[in-house]
Image (cartoon, rainbow, N blue to C red):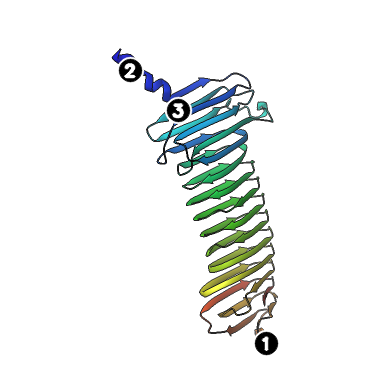
Amino acid sequence: MKVFQYILPVLLTSLALPALAGEKIDKVLPASGDSNISIESPNGDVSITGWDKDQVSVKGELDDNAEGFIFEQKGSLIEIKVMMPHNSNNRWNEQGSDLTIFVPKNARVSFGGVSSDVTLVDLTRNVDVKTVSGDLSGENLSNHVELLTVSGHIKVKGLSGKVQLSTVSGDIRDKASSGRLQLKAVSGDIKSQSEASEVQVTSVSGEIELNLAQVDELAISTVSGDVEGQLNLNDSGLVKLSSVSGDMALKFQPDVQASFRLKANAGGDLVNKLTSDKAVEAKYGPSSKLEFVTGNGNGSVRGNTVSGNIRVASR
């Protein structure tokens, strides 16, 4: 009897099972806000939603080629894993696994996949998601949010806290974020409408479009991509701009108060629509600089371009 009492909880919290082709999944484990939820599903569609229950629920259908399914609890760690054949990506069902997962909204969530499309909603603690070619979407995520895909797109709304979004060839669409925001793309385009106070945007050849409500710190770096932005620069705010051949155009609030120091090399142009001050050409070499102050000059705007243009204006 004592042996049975010992084994029963283990059976209830460890469900590592072989999987049948296209097997239906409907399983539940107890959890808490302190739980760490680790999820691996190489391909298919995965929806992860936070709820108020102290449970983790998994429903859906496995890939036809899945070799097993792990759903187990080890202390505060809950592992969810679709086991696929090794070195046989070409045999994977194009549809992949289709999983709907509910977790305590303040649990920590991590996800790893290859061609998985992932949707995340209502998670209020750490979220860490990485996939290769899958698309990522999220809404109402907070605290520390990191979403990374190589060739997939990222589309999010209502993220807050420390937010990091990164893709190589995909596009990023961010709406109504706040806190500290970091956006990175190589050849993909970036579009953000944000209330974040600290914003860092990096791109190589993609286009950047920004609409920022309240900026304490803004850093934009691009090589050949163009930048268009509107922003409210807070008192004592800081803006840093850098481009090689890309053009950068920023519109500030009408009463912006900042000192501007812009520099262009190798033939780039500096255009000022805020005041009557003009760029001054260097005596030697194809370079120019533009320096002026608006209001009390408490803020700071610094920009440098090699062969691109920088334009500053009022909204």
The amino acid beneath tag 3 is Glu
Image spot of residue 211 (x, y percent) = 64, 64
Q: Which of marks 3 and 2 is nearer the N terminus?
A: 2
Asked if labels 1 and 3 touch by Cβ distance under 8 angstroms, the answer is no
Looking at the image, the residue that sits furthest to the front is: 52
Three-letter code for the amino acid on which mark 2 is drawn: Gln
Count neighbours of disc 1 (C-alpha within 10 A) and say few if under 14, some if 14 to 19, many if 20 or more: few
User: What is the spatial separation of the Cα atoms under label 3 and label 1, in whole angstroms?
Assistant: 68 Å
Q: Position of residue 51 (x, y in %)?
A: 51, 40
Q: Counting residues from the N terminus, which is met first, the one under dot 3 or under dot 1?
A: 3
Query: Which of the two discs, 3 and 2, sits closer to the camera?
Result: 2
Mark 2, residue position = 5
Which picture quadrant has residue 261? Answer: bottom right
**Residue 72: mark in rendering:** 3
Q: Nearer the viewer, mark 3 or mark 1?
A: 3
User: Residue 275 appears in which quarter of the rendering?
Assistant: bottom right
Q: Indicate the secondary structure of the residue bearing disc 3.
A: strand
Mark 2 lies on a secondary structure that is helix
Q: Number of numbered discs present?
A: 3
Q: How far apart are marks 3 and 2 (CA)?
A: 19 Å
Residue ID at (37%, 22%): 9
| Pointer 2 or 1: first along the chain | 2
In the rendered image, which residue does mark 1 sit on? 276
- Is 164 above or below relative to 270? above
Percent position of residue 293, x then y: 58, 84
Image coords of residue 217 (percent x, y): 52, 68
